[in-house]
């Protein structure tokens, strides 16, 4: 173990359990239900479960909680495996399913029946609800609660054999119908469901309930620390009741931590599924989605996601983390790695009237200002150039140091130019600038020591490569869309803008998945689904600066 202080309360507990010899090795599990894609909240759980084990020489299971056939699918199973692996974690040979344990789980249920701790109930679903009581009123015992053990065993066997239709009976734990904790009011253990299971086919017509299956799977896998989110705190007495009754050879310990919530994003699989089903986004891996698949396609590096959850920490307090924190992790990660390139997102034509018609000069451009070892490239410069529309202003304020009528600006790696004429269309929109360049000011080799305040980027018209560039923004307009009555009402209508950008020629060969910085604009990469060399499709990963910072802080403060 490292000699630094454990960085959160769970690592503290684990540290103590190893020091005291309670455990020789830490065993954890990440137990997703394959009913959707993993999201940023799951990243936290994955990093925690795999992290604490890896840090202490322990091991981790990837266990599919597949007790809900019908809602679960192989597509989700495959996506989850791909995402966990991409995040950088390895379960080796420890890929399991709750359904792997259906047989021993059934045996455990039989044991509970035999010891008089479980019974088959024949009340209808409505009656069960009625008998359960409320938070302020105790429940009532079912009239079937005292069925003799033999009868319970017989009925359970016949439930398994498929003799009864869905909903006719239920196996329940016999605990306490007047417990203030609703989870202890004779919770269901098995329900009848005549439905095929993606893993066990038609072998079963009864399926175990989550709490029972989860607790016993933890015991079977000899999980030492069963880490889950805070909403399971009230389930811990039930978790422990199963262990007290069944006394498995290994006793796991449940510890709860608070969920990670990301501002301006939704982290409920049900709602994420609705976004997909209603075609509000283009699938689970739409780059605006807070899913791992979406963030990967967007171009977020796995290391940035790991860093993000590390900064968020592990606590018992609910937290809503600003999107800006995540984006900063992405920027920091990309800043060092990404080579610089030039591209113009909203092109405006500049004609250099004193530059020879057919001449092309090659300008040397650094690939990374902080890393000379990444070398240089040649940028063609010619009479007609594209610059960014908003790098020109006709009526510019005094502090506007880019291009304005009769103003001067430096073209990065090029010359100083001066704007002589502004050409407009019939609608009065600026469509072209007539400029002159100063031949003595060539970047690096020019003889003039003239300086101007602003430097802008550009691309030679004749050499430019067109690309569809997708500019992403927050999917929602409020900091906590999770708590909105209807998330449709708080969708950001401008979360995706597509522009036809002009890119420098070297970008025609941009390698798939390779992030680059477009100078002054942000970090970009090819879209993994739609990009081809013939028809480039480029995603903006993140802008260079956080334009939302102020707004986001305000919104977060208002929401407490
Ligand atoms: P649902 O959205 O359907 O309620 P879930 O988010 O709980 O489901 P699971 O597949 O059951 O999804 O989650 C797998 C594991 O990830 C669980 O241990 C769960 O506690 C954890 N987890 C889920 N969401 C978060 C979150 N926002 N922050 C931290 N951990 C999470
Ligand atoms: Mg869950």
Image: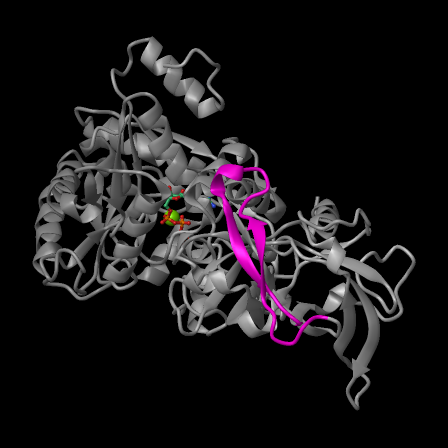
Residue 508 position in % (x across, y down)? 45, 65
Question: 503 left or right of 223?
Answer: right
Q: Residue 269 versus residue 204: which sits nearer the camera? A: 269
Whether residue 331 is visible: yes
Would you say residue 484 sits in the magenta stretch? Answer: no
- Farthest residue toward the right? 398
Res 195 → quadrant: bottom left
Q: Residue 471 versus residue 153: which sits nearer the camera? A: 471
Q: Is residue 250 above or below residue 20?
A: below
Which residues fall within the magenta stretch?
355-383
Whether residue 464 is visible: no
- Farthest residue toward the top? 20
The colour mode here is one colour
Q: Is residue 506 above or below residue 2?
A: below
**Image quarter (top left, top right, bottom left or bottom right) of the C terminus:** top right
Residue 450 position in % (x across, y down)? 82, 50
Q: Residue 233 versus residue 91: which sits nearer the camera? A: 91
Residue at left offset 77%, top offset 75% = 433
Q: Residue 229 versus residue 294: which sits nearer the camera? A: 294
**Image quarter (top left, top right, bottom left or bottom right) of the N terminus:** top left
Would you say residue 362 sits in the magenta stretch? Answer: yes
For the image, the number of numbered tags is 0
Q: Is residue 434 above or below residue 247?
A: below
Question: 206 left or right of 311?
Answer: left
Residue at left offset 54%, top offset 33% = 311
Question: 481 left or right of 277?
Answer: right
């Amino acid at each position: 173990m490292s000699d630094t202080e454990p960085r959160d309360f769970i690592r503290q507990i684990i540290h103590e359990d190893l020091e005291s010899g309670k455990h020789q090795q830490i065993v954890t599990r990440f137990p997703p239900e394959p009913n959707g894609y993993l999201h940023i909240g799951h990243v936290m759980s994955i990093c925690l479960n795999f992290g604490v084990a890896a840090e202490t020489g322990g091991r981790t299971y990837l266990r599919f909680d597949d007790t809900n056939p019908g809602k679960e699918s192989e597509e989700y199973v495959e996506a989850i495996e791909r995402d966990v692996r991409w995040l950088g974690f390895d379960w080796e040979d420890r890929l399991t399913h709750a359904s792997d344990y259906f047989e021993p789980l059934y045996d455990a249920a039989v044991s509970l029946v035999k010891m008089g701790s479980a019974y088959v109930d024949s009340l209808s679903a409505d009656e069960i609800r009625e008998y359960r009581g409320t938070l302020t009123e105790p429940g009532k015992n079912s009239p079937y609660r005292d069925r003799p053990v033999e009868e319970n065993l017989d009925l359970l066997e016949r439930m398994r054999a498929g003799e009864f239709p869905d909903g006719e009976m239920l196996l329940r734990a016999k605990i306490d119908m007047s417990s203030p904790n609703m989870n202890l009011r004779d919770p269901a253990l098995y329900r009848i469901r005549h439905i095929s299971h993606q893993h066990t086919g038609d072998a079963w017509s009864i399926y175990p309930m989550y709490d029972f299956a989860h607790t016993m799977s933890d015991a079977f896998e000899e999980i030492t620390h069963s880490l889950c989110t805070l909403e399971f705190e009230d389930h811990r007495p039930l978790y422990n009741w199963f262990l007290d009754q069944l006394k498995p050879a290994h006793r796991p310990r449940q510890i709860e931590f608070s969920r990670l919530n990301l501002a301006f994003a939704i982290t409920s699989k049900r709602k994420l599924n609705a976004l997909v089903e209603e075609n509000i986004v283009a699938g689970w891996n739409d780059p605006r989605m807070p899913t791992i698949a979406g963030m990967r396609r967007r171009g977020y590096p796995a290391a940035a996601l790991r860093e993000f959850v590390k900064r968020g920490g592990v606590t018992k307090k609910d937290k809503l983390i600003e999107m800006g924190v995540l984006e900063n992790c992405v920027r920091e990660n990309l800043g060092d790695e990404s080579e610089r390139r030039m591209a113009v997102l909203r092109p405006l034509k500049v004609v250099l009237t004193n530059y020879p018609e057919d001449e092309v000069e090659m300008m040397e451009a650094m690939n990374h200002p902080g890393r000379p070892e990444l070398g240089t490239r040649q940028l063609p410069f010619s009479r007609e150039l594209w610059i960014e529309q908003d790098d020109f202003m006709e009526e510019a304020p005094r502090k506007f140091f880019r291009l304005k009528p009769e103003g001067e600006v430096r073209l990065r790696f090029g010359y100083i130019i001066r704007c002589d004429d502004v050409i407009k269309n019939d609608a009065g929109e600026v469509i072209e600038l007539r400029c002159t360049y100063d031949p003595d000011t060539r970047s690096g080799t020019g003889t003039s020591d003239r300086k101007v305040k602003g430097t802008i980027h550009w691309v030679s018209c004749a050499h430019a490569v067109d690309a569809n560039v997708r500019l992403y923004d927050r999917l929602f307009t409020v900091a906590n869309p999770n708590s909105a009555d209807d998330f449709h009402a708080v969708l950001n209508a401008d979360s995706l803008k597509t522009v036809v950008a002009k890119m420098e020629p070297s970008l025609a060969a941009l390698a798939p998945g390779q992030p680059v910085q477009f100078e002054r604009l942000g970090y970009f990469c090819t879209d993994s689904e739609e990009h081809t060399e013939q028809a480039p499709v480029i995603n903006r990963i993140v802008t260079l600066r956080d334009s939302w910072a102020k707004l986001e802080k305000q919104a977060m403060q208002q929401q407490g």
